[in-house]
Image: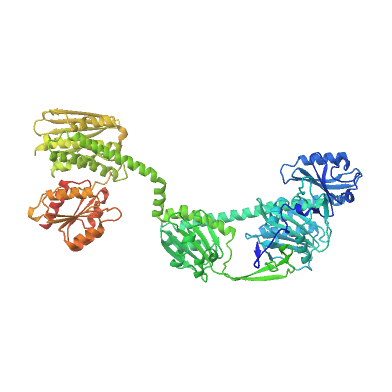
Amino acid sequence: MSGAGHTVDLTNCDREPIHKLGQIQDFGALLAVNADWMVVHHSVNVGEVLSPRAPVEPGVPVRDLFAAEAAEQMRDALSAIRDSDGIERLFGIDLVGDGNRFDVALHVSGALTVIEIEPHAGEAFASHIGSLRPMMADIEKQGDVEALCQRAAEQMKRLLGFDRVMVYKFHEDQSGEVIAEAREPELEAFQGLRYPKTDIPAQARALYLRNLLRIISDVNAAPVPIEPAVSLEGVPLDLSLSTLRSVSPIHIEYLKNMGVDASMSISIVVRGELWGLFACHHYSPRVLPYSLRTVAELFSQLFSLLIDRALTDARNEQARKGRAMHDRLMARMAGGAPLVENLTTIESVIREVIPHDGSSAMVEGVYQARGKAPAEDEFRALLPLLNSGSTSRVFASRALAEQIPAAHKFTDRAAGALVIPLSRRPRDYFVLWRRELPQVVTWAGNPEKPVEHSSHGARLTPRKSFEAWQESVSGESAPWTEAEMQIAESLRVTLLEVILRLTDEAIQDRARAQEQQELLIAELNHRVRNILNLIRSLINQSRHEAHDVGAFADLIGGRIGALAAAHDNITRENWSPASVHELIEAEAQAYLSGKVDRLTIEGDDVLIAPEAYTVLALVFHEMMTNSAKYGALCDSSGTLSIGLERNGGNLEISWRERGGPPVKPPERRGFGTMIIEKSIPFELKGGADIRYRLQGVEADFTVPARYVAAQPAGGRASPAKKADAKPDAGPAGQMPRHVLVVEDSMIIAMDTEDCLRQLGIKTVSISGNVAAALDTIADDRPEFAILDYNLGNESSEPVAQKLRELEIPFYFATGYGEANDALTQAGALGILKKPYGKDEIEGALSAFAGEQG
């Protein structure tokens, strides 16, 4: 560590292991024995304490020092030690067989067993043990941590008789504070004083976790050396777990500077962490019997459990408040408005459990703030460093400018921040702010320890003054407590997992899309490949039926159009079953020319599953095409009757043509005939039977029940009338001279241009984006336009708006089946539904001609 510009050597401070001191306190004796129970180390006062029967020196067997029964008791106790830091205690044992009783502590230090011996306080032993139960019964009545600590300090003082007993709690920065105190009336109060972390270095805190109790009975007593100082191998004895071991001379000097003659500290360990200490001071020498110290240590361990319970109760209460906060937020935000629009509501609920002076929300790039908070540009300046932090936990600072220099600009409004991340990408945040809270911290003396120089270099000097030393602190807010952090974490989960799902549909869709992205891509890839493969097969098989290119184009166009119409129906409600009535009407519409009485559909409508719908679409298309070429629909007198009937769940479809020309069976079996006869049996495992009778074609088809569902009550909405139906052509002179085509697919644009030129359009301009289209309109005003609505990352709406302003008629082209009404309301003369071809374009031009006429 460093202080006052100097590097400070902590060599002489308490550290783990402490064996370098090589000495113990004089109120007991120590032996270290090897596996053969031969003495390796001993304190020089063993004879004074024990009056052993033989001189003590390395290599002396323990049996020569202790009575056989005592040695056996110690061996039995040693076998009960289960871990490296375990200590076993024996009370009132007759070690040398002379009737004198001793208390013994045993622990393992490397390959040695350390035996510590103290005189036994026989008269007080029973009362020491009996005092524990009423002490615990008394402090268990206390409710919160502060009351527990105060009552425990009072009970510990009554038990031990020290002049002062304090409960010393460690803060997160490792400084300490006296949070409870019991003292003699004439002594000054230490409660509320803060002590810097250097008063108890990290090495000492680590030792407090291993050895829970430390005692100094007389700061002026000369320590007793251990002989030999090192073993035969040159290794000193590790006294980390020793009760009797002496302490650092710096610590002795520290106590003397405070006027303390005896002290004891007992660790308060909560869930494996050093939470605090019982710190006991006496202003004259004081030796406590080992049994009394053991009771005090056990009391501290039981007290630690009560602290843990109180902290757990407090956490549970905070969790309850967090749940209540969640419920209230849910109730108040049921309207579903975005988070930034609900900042007032959120803040009013949170303020009741986490006091703050302002709040900010940054969600999807939108910033909103209330109260004492930074402006938007000030907040955005924080984002680079905020984004480097964790997205899975809250971040709290009482002096944000110390972590993020950009926060200096608004310290006058907000110094402390509780940052709650809400997402990963883009980073969204909800932040609570606290204003600066100038304060005075009272330390037990100047926290900056002076450094003195000697021949050994720089070393820490214990403080000689412990008068209250006050430090003014600015640029900091009130601290965020652990309980508030827990509530903030609960709030993070609420906002992230619940509120945002209800109030911001875009965030919800994004989360779902991220989770299902691979699945959707795989499914889309599967369907596109199936469609492409189907079209490829249609083209390959259809080439045998056409006699010229034009007939081939018409044949393929009709079949692809049938598939497109079928896909419109089944995708209108997210790839769900669609109406068989709609399918028949859609396929017949091109051939009926408004004479709807020529087609009758008998029987209740049913829904056909998507996997069967496209199969039926191709079958009906081929049947309608044949009827229009050779059967009942090829003249003005024939009729077509289609019957629908459920039979055991299956759908029975009857096809009956009457009144047309005499029917002859086909001379050759083309691909269309194969579709009619084989598709339903092969793909659906259903039935198909076609008969070429003289009076008209008859056919019966069976669709299995697994593909058929009843039409729900009220039925489905009728599909939009085809905007690509071909109206009667207007006069050729009214056709547009110049047509603008806005399409981002080059192949579709080239095909559309080719169709337009075949239909007599002299000038065709092609634009692939909005900017190019607007430039074309400005340079050479068109008379008509065909606009692909979806142009990748933009729409053609700005082009449509410009055409409306110039009163230029236009058609929208789209592959979205349900977009018709919306696009027509946007001012379009009509809709071309993809895939479209020459016939549909001719219909659009005829509509233009009719409009002009």
Residue 406's spot in the image, x, y percent?
A: 49, 66
Examine the rendered structure and indicate whether residue 54 appears above or below residue 217.
above
Residue 141 visible in rendering: no
Residue 693's spot in the image, x, y percent?
A: 13, 28
Residue 302's spot in the image, x, y percent?
A: 71, 51
Quadrant location, the N terminus: bottom right
Of residue 328 and residue 492, the one placed in the foreground of this image is 492
| Model colouring | rainbow
Identified at 54% across, 67% down, the residue is 415
Examine the rendered structure and indicate whether residue 368 appears above or below residue 214.
below
Quarter holding residue 714? top left
Identified at 89% across, 51% down, the residue is 48
Residue 437 visible in rendering: yes
Of residue 675 and residue 210, the one placed in the foreground of this image is 210
Examine the rendered structure and indicate whether residue 526 appears above or below residue 326.
above
Tag count: 0
Q: Is residue 413 left or right of residue 513?
A: right
Q: Is residue 658 left or right of residue 180?
A: left
Identified at 24% across, 32% down, the residue is 679
Quadrant location, the C terminus: bottom left
